[in-house]
Image (spheres, rainbow, N blue to C red):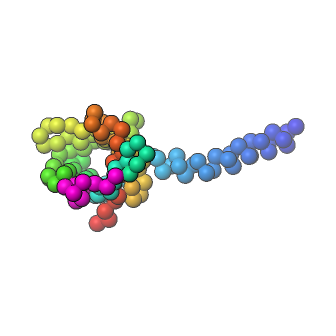
Amino acid sequence: MKSSNLILRLLFFIGLIPFSHTMVAQNVSKTALLKSWKLEKYYEEGEYYEPEVNEVNDYIDFKEDMTFSAMMEGELYSGTWMLNTNGAYIELKYTTQEIDKLRIKWLGTYSLVVIFDADYYRYTEVHYNSCEK
């Protein structure tokens, strides 16, 4: 009886090993964001889309002093940013005092997937690749 219980526990914990990497990879930290992220593509309703012509050079650069610069649709923006680890979102406050909330869907070493919390983007994933400096 004891050995079968021990075997079941062991199998349970061995079964968790493949998921442990996923859980660690989803841990959102400020230092993981501190780089420049170049727009790669969009994903909506099961399909990927390339950026529009005026978005080809778009990026977001998160700096350690909690400021950011961004190119969006060919226009340069800047401001401050904040990471909410409990809600897994980034808040961008532009110098114009406008605020965007980016819900983090995935954060890896070389990829960032966010959803802008705005009516017109609410179901669109925005995929970024890291730009190593």
Instruction: Judge left or right: residue 1 versus residue 121.
Output: right
Tell me: residue 71, above or below residue 1.
Answer: below
Q: Quadrant location of the C terminus?
A: bottom left
At 77% from the left edge and 42% from the top edge, which residue is drawn? 8
Counting every numbered tag in the picture gives 0
Q: Could one spot residue 17 in this view of the protein?
A: yes
Where residue 42 sits in the image (x, y, percent)? 34, 50
At 38% from the left edge and 35% from the top edge, which residue is drawn? 87
At 79% from the left edge and 45% from the top edge, which residue is drawn? 7
Quick one: which residue is furthest to the top in this view? 119
Instruction: Judge left or right: residue 48 versus residue 10.
Output: left
Where residue 103 sits in the image (x, y, percent)? 35, 40
Where residue 132 sits in the image (x, y, percent)? 32, 65
Instruction: Judge left or right: residue 108 versus residue 14.
Output: left
Q: Could one spot residue 31 in this view of the protein?
A: no
- Displayed quadrant of residue 2: top right
Q: Quadrant location of the N terminus?
A: top right
Quick one: which residue is furthest to the right in this view? 1
Residue range highlighted in magenta? 49-59
Where residue 11 sits in the image (x, y, percent)? 74, 46
Foreground of the two, 111 or 1: 111
Foreground of the two, 113 or 84: 113
- Displayed quadrant of residue 116: top left
User: Is 56 inside the magenta-drawn segment?
Assistant: yes
Quick one: which residue is furthest to the left in this view? 96
Quick one: which residue is furthest to the bottom in this view? 133
User: Is 125 inside the magenta-drawn segment?
Assistant: no
